[in-house]
Image (spheres, grey):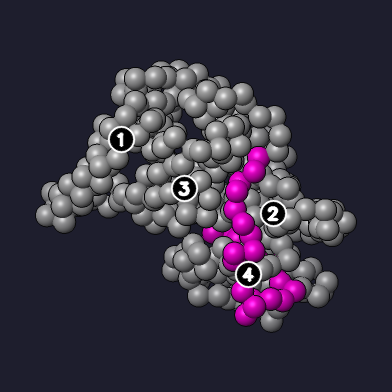
Amino acid sequence: MRVLLVKTSSMGDIIHTLPALSDAGKALPSIQFDWVVEDVFADIPKWHPLVSQVVPVALRRWRREIFTKNTRAEWKQLRTQLSEQRYDLILDAQGLVKSALLTFFARGTRSGLDWNSAREKFAALAYQRTHTVNFHQHAIVRMRQLFSQALGYALPNDKPDFGINRPQFQETSLHGNYLVFLHGTTWATKLWPESYWVQLAHLAGKAGYGIKISGGSEEEMARAHRIASHTDKVEVIPQLTILEMAQLLANSQGVVAVDTGFGHLAAALNIPTISLYGPTNPILTGALGRFSQHLAANFPCAPCLSRTCSYKKPTTVAPACFETVQPNQVWAAWQKLMAVYKSEKGQFSP
């Protein structure tokens, strides 16, 4: 069985979809997927053994350069590529109008979320088969339910299997007793206070850990250098590709992350991961893995799901809600998680 999967972004959403592929493979051993994904995330689907072909798109760039010759040529190439194979099913797991439109370029039965389940309701009008999935549950659960309905197998109730072989990322040059701090994210309200990262680095350094820190933009790299300026235990790594970051994470002792795509990747790789949540809700989008833990703000307006903080009363840090997620709490949680990891490490394959 050959399925075309449309799930273009974001990094966290793509990672959240991987367990559904694993479920499908266990229920339907002959199934294979081709995956339509934003080109910047094209490495991630390749890590799952059931993905035969990755079809990269550049919807974000194409919108900015809609009338250019290059964009027209790439659109034509995409339509040609998708029409070459007739699929047993075309599954839009994104639920957006833009992703639904992509399904028309391929040959096969179009399937996706129904009017009440899709993020953008009008996307449901593009599908020949629709499925009802409760939006108010974790993204991984939603994807597993969608795939089970679309492909006709019983929904498993076991823990999610991301299907990523962690040893493929082993790099001898990266071996060492280090943690990775993932401080960068897209919303200003999701940023854990810079002073807290410094305090956490001191706590980790006293325990004998080194810290590796990087960034995906000039602003994030500048923040990384400011954090590193307070202690010689922090090493700033130049900007990395997704593959390079996977290698950095996979060879680490553990990760502390804000709500960001690489935090989801760390958890999926079964690396001990502490994820910090302020304005966002870990119940719906928290990083999940065998050794992951969420620390969520205990604040009157959290989770607000807002990109801007509207809290007006004086606080010691900003965003205000992170006043309830202190560095000593994070370090205590990390130590407990690491103890669990060490006790169970011999019982599972990474």
Q: Amino acid at mark 2?
A: Asn
Sequence order check: which comes first, mark 2 or mark 1? 1
The answer to whether the residue labelled 3 contacts the one labelled 4, judged by CB atoms less than 8 Å apart, is no
Q: Helix, strand or loop at disc 1?
A: loop
Toward the viewer: 78 or 118? 78
Q: Which residue is mark 1?
A: 86
Q: Amino acid at mark 3?
A: Val
Residue 311 visible in the shown view: no
The residue that appears at 46% across and 47% down in the rendered structure is: 51
Could you say where residue 266 lies in the image, as x and y percent from the top left? 63, 56
Give how far apart the Cα atoms at labels 3 and 2 are: 21 Å
Residue 46 visible in the shown view: yes
The residue that appears at 51% across and 46% down in the rendered structure is: 50
Sequence order check: which comes first, mark 3 or mark 4? 3
Q: Amino acid at mark 1?
A: Arg
Q: Which residue is mark 4?
A: 170
Toward the viewer: 92 or 48? 48
Label 2 CA crowd tier, 10 Å (few <14, some 14–19, many 20+): many
Which numbered circle lies on residue 51? 3
Q: Amino acid at mark 4?
A: Gln
Q: Helix, strand or loop at disc 3?
A: strand
**Which corner quadrant of the image does residue 245 belong to?**
bottom right
Which numbered circle lies on residue 270? 2
Marks 3 and 4: which is nearer the front? Answer: 3
Give how far apart the Cα atoms at labels 3 and 4 are: 22 Å
Could you say where residue 177 lies in the image, as x and y percent from the top left? 75, 74
Magenta region: which residues?
160-188
The answer to whether the residue labelled 3 contacts the one labelled 2, judged by CB atoms less than 8 Å apart, is no
Q: Is residue 30 left or right of residue 327?
A: left
Q: Is residue 171 magenta?
A: yes
